[in-house]
Amino acid sequence: AGNIPVTMTRLDGEREQTVMRLKKTVTIGQIKQRVETELGIHPDEQLLLFRGRRGVEAKDTVQPLSVPDLNDIIQEAGEKGLQMSVVARPKELPDFLRKEGLEEVNARRKSGATVLHRAVRKCKTYVMQELLEECEDFTGTDARDRAGQTALHGACAARLREPLERLLKSEKFTAVGAR
């Protein structure tokens, strides 16, 4: 298991070329930690794209983050042809607010639903993350709509596992009976 040179390009307005040496058994999590250290992009804001030059069709060049290590990619691309791009994921909350017709994070719809209710119902986990972890102004974490339902009720009713887990793990969410 030797090192694999990877050409890394940061695509958040400026382009940077660098070579990162990775072992074949490195995990995506380890790559994300190195990208944060070397390029300053937080792991939650990273999208990693892998592509290879040797016999890999364009439709197969982007590998999802669920790839456990680089072995699968190397088998397709070859060690010398491996390239990695790091894209800084843009914030989704402003666009989501606009699409929902809400002026600001604490605004409510006619039904009494907050932006968190809407994000849960639409399974927008990145929006939920921004609200629950990054948005200090948001006060509607435990809010109830006109039917008396919290965002947790909506996640349970629709059987949305990922939003449900995000709510329960959040330090901001304190609805009675939720824990």
Image: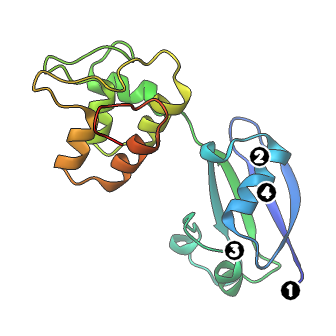
Query: On the image, numbered disc 1 is attached to which residue?
Result: 1
| CA–CA distance in space, label 4 to label 1 | 21 Å
The C terminus sits in image quarter:
top left
Q: Which residue is mark 3?
A: 52
Could you tell which of marks 2 and 4 lies nearer the N-terminus?
4
Vertical placement of 26 versus 9: above or below?
A: below
Q: Nearer the viewer, mark 2 or mark 3?
A: 2
Q: Residue 165 in the image: state x and y as whole percent.
A: 39, 50
**Where in the figure is residue 167, as x and y percent of width and height?**
39, 41
Check if mark 3's residue and mark 4's residue have beta carbons within 8 Å: no
Q: CA distance from mark 3 to mark 4?
A: 13 Å
Give the residue type at disc 1. Ala
Judged by depth in the image, the label closer to the viewer, 4 or 1, is: 1
Which quadrant of the view contains residue 96?
top left
Disc 3 to disc 1, how far (Cα)? 19 Å
Q: Nearer the viewer, residue 146 or 9?
A: 146
Callout 3: helix, strand or loop?
A: loop
Q: Residue at x 74, y 60 (%)?
A: 31
Earlier in the chain: of badge 4 and badge 1, it is 1
Q: Tell me the CA gap for discs 1 and 2.
A: 24 Å
- Residue 8 marker: 4
Q: Earlier in the sequence, mark 1 or mark 2?
A: 1
Picture coordinates of residue 25 (x, y %)?
Answer: 76, 78
Amino acid carrying label 4: it is Met
> Which is nearer the N-term, disc 2 or disc 3?
2
Nearer the N terminus, badge 3 or badge 1?
1
Q: Nearer the observer, disc 3 or disc 4?
A: 4
